[in-house]
Structures are given as C-alpha cells and as structure tokens.
C-alpha cells in the first residue's frame, strides 16, 4: 500500500532524505547514501512519534541518539548536523497539528535528549574499545616485554597503528617512546614529547589520587590504574583524556617500564559541560535554575555544626501587569535586567542568586554567621530594585516582596526552608509589598495549619464532620424564645471543635461555602420543622424561626433562590420559618442585580436580616431600598453598656437606630447580651429581640426546645 502523495509518510521520507544528506558526508559507513537514508527512516519515524506523543518520552529520544552511534555516525559533527536538521525541519515535516510554541519547545527538549543519548552511547562505545585495547595491552604485557628483546617489528606495528595515544616511559619517568596518535593529541613532535618527564605533566585539576596511584605503580605495588586526567598543550589549551597506565615487567617479573594509553575526551567533555550547564541554568537569564539552587541549598544545610544559612525569597510586585500590558517579550527583558541586578548583589563568598521560575528569585548565603549577612543581602536587593528599568522606551518601576529565612544548618530540609521563605514572602506581600519580612515560626505554623484545614474541608463535608449549634433569639418584652441562630461547627479529627471564624473564610476562598451553606440551610430548616411540630400550638406567641447566615459568595450564587425554595418545599416548612442573615458590609453599594434574589425571597415570606449593623459605614438612606425586615445591631453597642453608667452617646445612637428602624417597619435584634442590666437597658430603648450568653450559649437543638417549653408554661 503506497502512501498518499503529500501525506504524513511522504513528509517523513522527505525529512529522512534531508537528514541523510546532511549527515552522510561525515558518517563512517560503507553504505550508499540511499541505503543510509533507509537506515535513518525508522529513526525519523521514532522522532516523529516522540514529537507528537502526549507526554515527552525522553528515553525514546535518547535511544535515537544512541542508534546514530550504532549506525557508525561517531564523528562529533554528525551530532551537530543532526541537531541542526531536527531543529529546522522536524516540526515542519512531522507535526501535522498542534500548538507551534509547544511543538518548538518539545523539539528543543527532544534535541537535548538525542544529544544526551548520542554522548552516552559514544562514551560507552569508546570505553568498550578502550577496554578492549587495555585488555589487549594487559594480555600483551608479556608479549611486549619479549618483543623488546625478540620481536620489535611486531610491537612497532601495534604501537604505531593504534588509534589512541600510547607512550612508554621508564620507572624514573623518562619518556622513551610515543606513537603518532599521542604526538597529534599534544601538538608536539616526537622529540618534544620525549624531552618531557612524566612528573612534568601535572595539572591543577588532577584528582588527589592520581599521583599516589602512579607512585604505587612504579614501586610495583599495582599493575595498572585508570583515571580521567587533564594536560596542558604548548598553546595553553587543555587536553582532557581517559588515561590508563600499566606496569611492564621483565622476564624475571621485576618492574621495568610504564605504558600509558590515552583517549582524547576533550570534545566529549565540552559537550557534557554544555549539557550540564543547560540543565542547571535558566535559559532566559543565565542564572542557576531551581535544580542547581536545590543542590546548593542541600549542601549548605548539610554543612554540619557551626554553620548557618540565610535565604531571601523574592517575588516581584505587579509583574503580571507588565506582561498583560506590554507583552511577554517586555516582561522577559524586565526579568533579564532584574537578574543582572540581583547577580551584582550576591558577590561575596558563599552567596548565589537563582531563578526559580516566573518572577520568583532566591538568594542564598552560607557561612558561620549569616544573620547580619542575610539582612544586608536583602537590603542590597531592595536597593537594587529602586532605580527604574527602561523597557521599550518606558521607565518601569520595579518593586519586590522578600521572605527571609536564617538559621543553623542541619535542622530543616530544603523543602521546609523554601516553604518558610515562601510563606514569609507572601506575608510581606500582604503587608503592602516593597519590603522584606523575617520568618516567624508561629506565623508559619498558622499558615500551614490554615492550608491543612483548607485541603481537609471537602473531605470533612463528605465525612459529616460538621454540626450545628443553636443560640436562642429572645423577645425583650415578654422574655419568650422566638427562634434561634444556626451556628455551624467543625469537629476536626486533630484540632477538635473549630468555630466558624476558623474555617468559614477558607470555605469562602475555595468556593466550598456554597455546598456547606446549602447543607447548613437544609439541616436548619429541617430543625425548624421539628420545633414547629413540637411547639406550634398551645397559645405560643409566635412560631419558632431559624436564622441562617449567608456569605457574600452565597449571595451572588445563581442558585440561591432555587436552592432555598427546594429546601423549604422538601422539608414542608413555610417561608416565614426562615430568616437569612446578610452582613451589612456585603450589601454596601449593592446594585439591583445583587438585591434581586433577596427581594424574591422576601416576597415569598422569607425574612432578611441585616447583620452586624453599625459596622459597615453604610448610608442609612439605603435602608429604604434593601429588602430587609430585621436589623441586627453589632455586639459593639452592647459592650459599651457593660459599664455603669452607660455612655449616653452610645445610648442615643442605639435609640436613634431603633427609632429609625421602627419608622421603616423593621424589627431590631441585638447581639452579645451578657447581663440582665444590658437586657433591661435595651428593652427600655425599644429593641425587640436579643441573643447572647445572658440567655444561653450556642448549644444542641434540644436545649432550645426546653427553653421554649419553659417560656410557654411560664
């Protein structure tokens, strides 16, 4: 079956053709170019599959690089031409659809993986060849020694024909013979090399054991050793080699010569260094990246007793605005300039700056006393951001928030340190930004606990860990119970009973307040039905009513009216059994769209109470347009009445609010009543109902029923 002209297979073959033409001139193969193209076609197909896969298959891409080596494409230029071809043509010929930016990014990662696979396979192949040569040399030690006496011609053929550098020296280090490969590696003549002694080839990067192993060998204490060693060439450049040195003994077994086998690994090392740099540094700013930073942080934290560390976690204030208004290219230029300034701030020994991602940077310092140093480092960073940054002709003011963590090494893990710094940075941002804050373990614990509660909320609702307590609403005129306010509690497995102030803000932030509020409404309405069934006759002044709080998030939820109606109908309860409490602050400046659901509920007969009245600085004239029937005075008014005599100004304010409310046909409820004197004073001022510890603390529904029965029989 032939492929459709211009279809995916045709484009794949076109890519393989371009690839083979680029690589064939430097490939060590006996195949013709068409034959070589057929060898590359399966590899091209594998590259296409990696490019188009849902997840990035790095092992498969590395396998393609290794397959090039297996196909005798071992010249370093082969890799360079392959990567150029992949970069230029893979997306063009092998990507049928998809996000171009994503495909280019995938292609870049694919190139890295191919290069890594090529380098690893080439190294394994070279090591295998070297091992074979080394083994041959070891096996031939006796032959070489004998050849020096009887068969110089055979040894010379092996010696001169070898592809790796070979040198022979006596035990004093005088170089006796070298082959052509070794002279080419060093760029010296045969005479120039033999004029040097082995000990002249020291290098600052020599491993500590290199010369110890050499001394053991010439003393006859070991037969051979293998190390990675650098040499200086005459022009000052560095030659990196895999060096194997073996001891040659005479016929009696006494040490006589040392034989060195050298493989030039300079290009491979440079490639590995480049790949290592790209893997540990940020492509945009050139700063160390998250991976490199964590390596340094782990090292600083493992330094042992007597060592300390300091960390500054920086997040730019308002960086998203730059990206949104000027574009990501301008944002990138801004980040590059910030990175340059931060780099200039961390020049002392033990200091480094890294980019974690986005507009987040970290600065690390380590040493015996980092307390003053990290403060100074944070100050330098803040000062470095003072001067505006010019981007596309605009002078941009840059500010940042920094979280600073300092302490002894060995007490915390890198993840714990970074979490503390992140928490502290957000504390600085919440305080207005453009500042740095020092880590506070207690503040960290509160944030961690808050996060734990946030993540536990959904499961807590499913497991039924919430329950409701009820606080009575008492009529100030006759002292009878008129209803109760439903107050939700969380029975947490670790923290015990939590009040709404601990979890309601978290539920509002995560959106869980809607299902939680619906559950509270269902339970409360069901309880109201029970109360009315038990206490709905017998001359009671009024049927019991349940008050349920509405959060601002619930107030704007489109299903508020529908859910409320369904709950009332399902429970078989009249709307007048329910009062929904909305805080004054939630209704400040409310437009008609926000008030429409409340008006619909009020028209049905549901009471709407304006909670915490007197704290929101609202315009009293707005009371006329709000669909409320009850004002709940904030407990701050009752607190002032605990003193004797009560503040006459507060009494006048309460009296005025009550008169205003009654003129608008609103009833007034007061919260926080704790003494009989307060209750009497509020009754005299004309307040209608009250709640507080003077009457009862929040408790189970049975207690309210008992109170109601007492009132009914009094």
Image (spheres, rainbow, N blue to C red):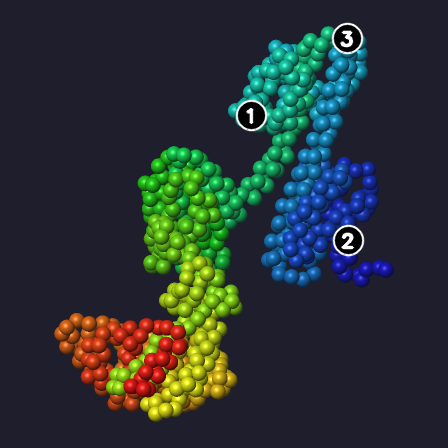
Distance from disc 2 to disc 3, alpha carbons, whole Å, reads: 60 Å
Does residue 20 lie above or below 489 as drawn?
Answer: above
> How many angstroms separate mark 2 from mark 1 (CA)?
49 Å
Q: Residue at x 68, y 40 (%)?
A: 118
CB under 8 Å between discs 3 and 1: no
Which numbered dot is residue 13? 2
Q: Position of residue 332 (x, y in %)?
A: 48, 54
* Mark 3 or mark 1, earlier in chain: 3
Camera-near label (3 vs 1) is: 1
Mark 2, mark 1: which one is toward the viewer?
A: 1
Helix, strand or loop at mark 3: helix
What residue does disc 1 label?
A: 207
Q: Which residue is mark 3?
A: 149
Q: Decide which of tag 2 and tag 3 comes sooner along the chain.
A: 2
- In this rendering, the answer to whether 686 lies above or below 2 is below
Q: Nearer the viewer, mark 2 or mark 3?
A: 3
Secondary element under disc 1, as helix, strand or loop, is loop
Say which of 697 and 627 sits in front: 697
Residue 96, image quadrant:
bottom right
Q: Position of residue 169 (x, y in %)?
A: 66, 13
Q: Quadrant of the C terminus?
A: bottom left
The residue depicted at 46 percent of the width and 61 percent of the height is 493
Q: Is residue 380 something one can see in this rendering? A: no
Say the numbered circle drawn on residue 469.
Answer: none
The picture places residue 550, in percent across and down from the top left corner, at 40, 76
Q: Residues within 10 Å of mark 3 (few under 14, many from 20)?
A: few
Instruction: Please say whether residue 13 is visible from this viewpoint.
Output: yes
Q: Residue visible at 62% across and 50% down? A: 108
Crowdedness of circle 2 by 10 Å Cα count: few (<14), some, many (20+)?
Answer: many
Which structural element holds mark 2? helix
Image quadrant holding the N terminus, namely: bottom right
């Amino acid at each position: 079956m032939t492929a459709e002209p211009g279809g995916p297979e045709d484009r794949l073959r076109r890519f393989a053709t371009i690839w083979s033409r680029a690589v064939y001139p430097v490939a060590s193969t006996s195949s013709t170019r068409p034959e070589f193209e057929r060898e590359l076609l399966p590899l091209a197909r594998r590259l296409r599959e990696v490019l188009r896969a849902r997840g990035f298959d790095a092992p498969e891409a590395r396998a393609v690089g290794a397959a090039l080596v297996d196909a005798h494409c071992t010249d370093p230029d082969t890799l360079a031409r392959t990567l150029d071809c992949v970069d230029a043509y893979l997306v063009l010929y092998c990507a049928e659809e998809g996000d171009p930016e994503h495909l280019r990014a995938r292609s870049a990662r694919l190139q890295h993986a191919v290069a890594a696979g090529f380098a690893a396979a080439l190294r394994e192949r070279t090591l295998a060849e070297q091992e074979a040569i080394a083994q041959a040399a070891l096996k031939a030690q006796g032959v070489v020694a004998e050849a020096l006496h009887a068969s110089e011609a055979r040894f010379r053929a092996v010696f001169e024909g070898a592809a790796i550098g070979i040198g022979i020296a006596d035990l004093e280090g005088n170089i006796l013979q070298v082959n052509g490969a070794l002279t080419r590696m060093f760029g010296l003549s045969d005479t120039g090399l033999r004029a040097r002694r082995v000990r002249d080839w020291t290098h600052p990067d020599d491993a500590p054991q290199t010369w110890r192993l050499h001394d053991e060998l010439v003393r006859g204490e070991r037969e051979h050793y293998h190390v990675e060693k650098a040499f200086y060439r005459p022009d000052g450049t560095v030659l990196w080699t895999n060096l194997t040195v073996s001891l040659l003994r005479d016929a009696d077994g006494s040490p006589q010569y040392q034989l060195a086998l050298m493989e030039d690994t300079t290009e491979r090392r440079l490639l590995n260094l480049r790949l290592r740099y790209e893997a540990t540094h940020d492509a945009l700013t050139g700063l160390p990246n998250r991976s490199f930073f964590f390596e340094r942080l782990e090292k600083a934290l493992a330094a042992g007793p007597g060592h300390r560390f300091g960390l500054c976690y920086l997040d730019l204030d308002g960086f998203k605005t730059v990206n949104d208004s000027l574009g990501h290219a301008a944002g990138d230029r801004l980040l590059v300039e910030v990175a340059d300034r931060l780099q200039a701030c961390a020049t002392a020994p033990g200091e480094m700056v890294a980019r974690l991602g986005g507009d987040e940077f970290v600065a690390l310092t380590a040493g015996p006393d980092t307390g003053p140093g990290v403060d100074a480092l944070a100050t330098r960073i803040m000062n470095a951001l003072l001067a505006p940054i010019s981007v596309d002709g605009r002078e941009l003011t840059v500010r940042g928030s920094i979280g600073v963590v300092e302490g002894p090494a060995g007490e915390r893990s890198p993840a714990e340190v970074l979490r503390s710094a992140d928490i502290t940075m957000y504390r600085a941002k919440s305080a207005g930004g453009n500042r740095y804050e020092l880590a506070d373990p207690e503040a960290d614990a509160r944030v961690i606990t808050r996060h734990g509660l946030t993540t536990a909320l959904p499961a807590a609702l499913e497991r039924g860990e919430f329950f409701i307590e009820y606080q009575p609403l008492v009529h100030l005129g006759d002292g009878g119970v008129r209803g109760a306010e439903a107050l939700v509690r969380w029975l947490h497995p670790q923290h015990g009973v939590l009040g709404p102030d601990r979890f309601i803000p978290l539920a509002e932030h995560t959106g869980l307040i809607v299902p939680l509020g619906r559950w509270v409404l269902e339970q409360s309405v069901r309880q109201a039905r029970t109360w009315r069934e038990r206490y709905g006759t017998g001359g009671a002044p009024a049927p019991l009513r349940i008050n349920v709080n509405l959060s601002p998030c619930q107030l704007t939820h489109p299903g508020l009216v529908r859910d409320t109606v369904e709950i009332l109908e399902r429970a078989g309860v009249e709307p007048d059994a329910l009062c929904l409490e909305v805080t004054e602050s939630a209704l400040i400046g409310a437009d008609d769209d926000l008030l429409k659901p409340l008006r619909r509920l009020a028209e049905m007969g549901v009471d709407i109470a304006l909670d915490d009245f007197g704290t929101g600085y609202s315009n009293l004239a707005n009371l006329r347009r709000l669909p409320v029937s009850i004002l709940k005075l904030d407990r701050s008014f009752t607190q002032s009445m605990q003193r004797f005599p009560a503040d006459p100004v507060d009494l006048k304010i309460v009296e005025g609010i009550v008169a205003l409310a009654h003129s608008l046909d609103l009833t007034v409820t007061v919260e926080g009543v704790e003494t009989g004197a307060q209750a009497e004073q509020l009754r005299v001022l004309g307040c209608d109902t009250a709640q507080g510890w003077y009457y009862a603390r929040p408790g189970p529904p049975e207690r309210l029923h008992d109170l109601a029965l007492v009132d009914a029989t009094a």
